Each structure stands twice: as C-alpha cells, then as structure tokens.
Amino acid sequence: MANYVIGDVQGCLDSLLKLLEKAQFTPQADVLWFAGDLVNRGPRSLDTLRFVKNLGARAHTVLGNHDLHLLALWCNSGRSHESDTIAEVVNAPDGGELVDWLRSQPLALALPGPQNALLTHAGILPQWSFEQAQSLSAEVQHALSGPDWQAFMAELYGNKPNRWEPELSGFDRLRFIVNVFTRMRMVRDDGKIDFKYKLEPEDAPPDLQPWFDIPREFPGEGPIIFGHWSTLQQIRNKAGYCLDTGCVWGGQLTALRLEDEAIIQVEAVEPPLSSIG
C-alpha cells in the first residue's frame, strides 16, 4: 500500500491519469491525497471531479481557491472569469451531487505515515499548531456542509481581515480561515497577509516574505504539504513540500509518495494556459 499526495490538478485529468500510470497506482491498495484545486482552467474539470469522487475512500482532498470558486458560481455568489472551465460542472446532470460532495471536504488534513505531515492547499499561519489548524478547518467545513452554506458563500470573498486575531467571529473569522488555507503566499512584516503578490519570493518587495520562511511557533511538528504556488519553483522548502508545479501552465503534475518521500512527475499533457492568474 502506498499513499500519494498530488498537487493542483485543475481539470487536467489526462495528466493525472498519466501520473497515476507512472506511479503504478492501484486503487484496490493505494490512497490518493489531493492538495486542492481539483478543477478550473484545465479542460476536464467535470471528469476530474467524477473521477476523484468515484474513488471513494481511496481518495481524499482539501479545498483550494478554485474549488471554492466553483461552489460560489453554483450559488450565484461569484463572478465568472474568461479562463474558467467549470460551467460544465454547474450544468451537468450530477452537478448538484458533485457540489455537495465537494463542499463537504476539509481545508486541512492530517496525513498518514511517520512524517506526521499536514496537507492544505496554500499553507498555515506560523502561530497555528496542526491541532488548531484542523480545528479551524472543521469550523469552515461545518459551515460549508450545513444547510445555510450559501449564506456563507455570499460573504466569502474579500481580503479583510488580513491578520489573525483569536477573537475574530462570524463571517470575518470564517473568511480569514479560508483565505489562509486557500490563498496565502506572502506575509508582511506586521503579520498581515498580502494577497496580491503571486510570483517568485526572490523578486518580492522587502517587506514581504513567504509564509513558510516565518519561524513556526511549533517547530517540533511535521512537514506541511501544500500546492497553490506554481511560480515558487521549489518543491522542497522550509515548511515541507509545495506540489503545485504548474501543470495547467504547461509544467508538470507532481506527486509525493509518503512512504519514502519519492517525487514522481509527468509533463503536462494538456495545452498550457498563456498567463498566470
């Protein structure tokens, strides 16, 4: 049995199938763990959702910002973009079933194995322990999987608040938690999250640093495995592993096998997108 953690698929199902073939994935024995952004921008978002959902207990995923974008469009709380490829999910006969499955997924997952790793789409704050991160993830999962989830989606978008305060409550608290887990890259010297900078850390303004370069308050915990940052251009970093290697942009789709920390990659099959967003 092997456990494979896979970076941002974003609807690139053909690349995913190629990666699984290279890894010799066996659904009867192995388990897949996805770092979020299963959908959007790639050509087969609907098929990707169906494929992962149909694996049942052999596949797990955290939510990424593009997955949440799909949920927002489903309930008319988000704006569509020219690069979106998720209308096919909204219009599919099983679209409601897929959306219900997707909105029941967490933002953070403890991974099996001796590394005691944590999986999330974008990262966690340095002052959050793994236990706290999973508790905060559960708060959002409860809101998303509940009957009033569309009211939450209507309040999801926004960059405020941009600094963690334990006293945050209501939609402000939930929005901040979502933004950390699905959008964070850079943090300012004053602890505020910057949501605009998306390129390589080396070219960032001097008052910004990657979230994983900030010393953790719980250094004895395991690695953090994440995706989201295709321009990072480094798989191994101070936090753990970034598995978004830009498949949808013509890069690679990457998996990490937890048992021996082997990196498995394939070149993207799909035609690349032309710009970063």
Image: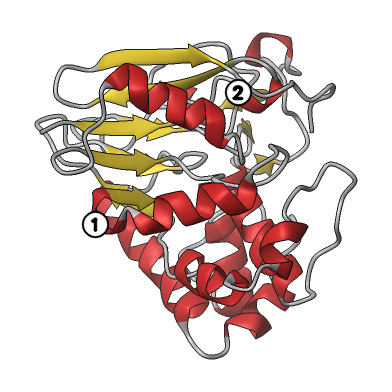
Q: Nearer the viewer, residue 235 or 196?
A: 235
Q: Nearer the viewer, residue 190 or 22?
A: 22
Considering the numbered disc 1 on the image, is that residue within a helix, a strand or a loop? helix
**Residue 18: horizontal and vertical position, in percent?**
45, 23
Residue visible at 16% across and 41% down?
112
Residue farthest front in this picture: 93
Residue corresponding to mark 1: 57
Residue corresponding to mark 2: 247
Tag 2: amino acid: Cys
Q: CA distance from mark 2 to mark 1?
A: 25 Å
Residue visible at 40% across and 32% down?
6
Q: Which quarter of the picture shows residue 225?
A: top left
**Residue 166: horizontal and vertical position, in percent?**
46, 65
Tag 1: amino acid: Ala
**Residue 158: horizontal and vertical position, in percent?**
76, 60
Considering the numbered disc 2 on the image, is that residue within a helix, a strand or a loop? helix
Q: Which tag, 2 or 1, sits closer to the chain's start?
A: 1
Q: Which mark is residue 277?
A: none
Q: Residues within 10 Å of mark 1 (few under 14, many from 20)?
A: few
Scheme of image coloration: secondary structure
Residue farthest bottom in this picture: 147
Q: Work out whether 177 lies above or below 226.
A: below
Residue farthest right in this picture: 82
Residue visible at 84% across and 21% down?
274
